[in-house]
Amino acid sequence: MTRSAHTSGSLRQFLSGVRMLGAGFGVWRTAPALMMLGLLPAVIVAIAFGFGVVALGLNLESITVAITPFASEWDEPLRSGARVLAGLAMLVVAVLFIINAFTAVTLIVGQPLYERIWQHVEGLSGGAPDAPDVTFLAGMSRGVTDGIRMLIPTVLTGAALFALGFVPVAGTILSACLGAVAGGWFLAVELTGPAFESRGKTLAERRRVLRAHRPMVTGFGLASYLVFLIPLGAVVMMPVAVAGAATLSRALLAPETEPVSGLDQTMS
């Protein structure tokens, strides 16, 4: 395979992943009441997170001063420049953590509703596998455990992006771009949980499958992340992202599923 053919194939997969997020909108036609209910957990969690975001905004200047003590003795404009870079780097990392933490907490809080959305999409696409008999508390415990396990790479990524953000201009732009790609990847890992878990896949196995289809997963995750950046976008798009992730999961696990129909046809 030539390099151009490989690039073209990767681009098609990337765009296919983006379209899978859009396919989630199709569920509003087939189950509007269910999708409306899917907004409730996102609204509740968004209100709680809103206080944290406001607190961060009000204290951002004092935080940047606190994390740049080395610049206190510098002359202007070096001192202000260092603190501006620190503030921008802090914002990039904060957005990464807030979006992924919001998604993880919302999925835990709204597990029963999002489980129904997933099952509905699976039904449209040819039938859902028999979900394991798991109690609400057991499902929440598993969600918390997986969330903590996914927090580790998020923390490491955030630290690297923060350090990169201190490089003037290019570092700030690059950290924001890399933060979006990394954040989108973490979102995809979180949102595909129900479909993989219903098929007995562990978090490690889920990551392995996602890495094997990196362009498609990146397209879906990056599109989700960018939409979540829009004010209230995460709230409005949460049930759509869950539905789109169900379609993505079926595509990645195609050897284990029957030929699909229904919602998946929107990807043709």
Image: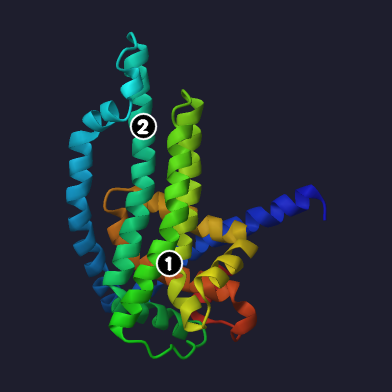
Q: Tell whether 13 sits left or right of 232.
A: right
Q: Which residue is mark 2?
A: 88
Residue at (37, 56) in percent of width and height: 100
Residue at (44, 55) in percent of width and height: 152
Q: Amino acid at mark 1?
A: Leu
Which quadrant holds the C terminus?
bottom right
On screen, 108 above or below 150?
A: below
On screen, 14 above or below 56?
A: below
Residue at (46, 34) in percent of width and height: 163
Indicate the quadrant where residue 41 lies.
Answer: bottom left
Q: Which mark is residue 191?
A: 1
Residue 219 place in picture, x, y as percent: 54, 56
Tell me if I can see residue 22 in this picture.
Answer: no
On screen, 95 above or below 190?
A: above
Residue 116 place in picture, x, y as percent: 34, 81
Label 2 crowd bin: few (<14), some (14–19), many (20+), radius 10 Å: many
Name of the residue lying farthest toward the top = 75
Residue nearest the observer in this picture, 47 or 104: 104
Element class at badge 2: helix
Residue 166 place in picture, x, y as percent: 44, 27
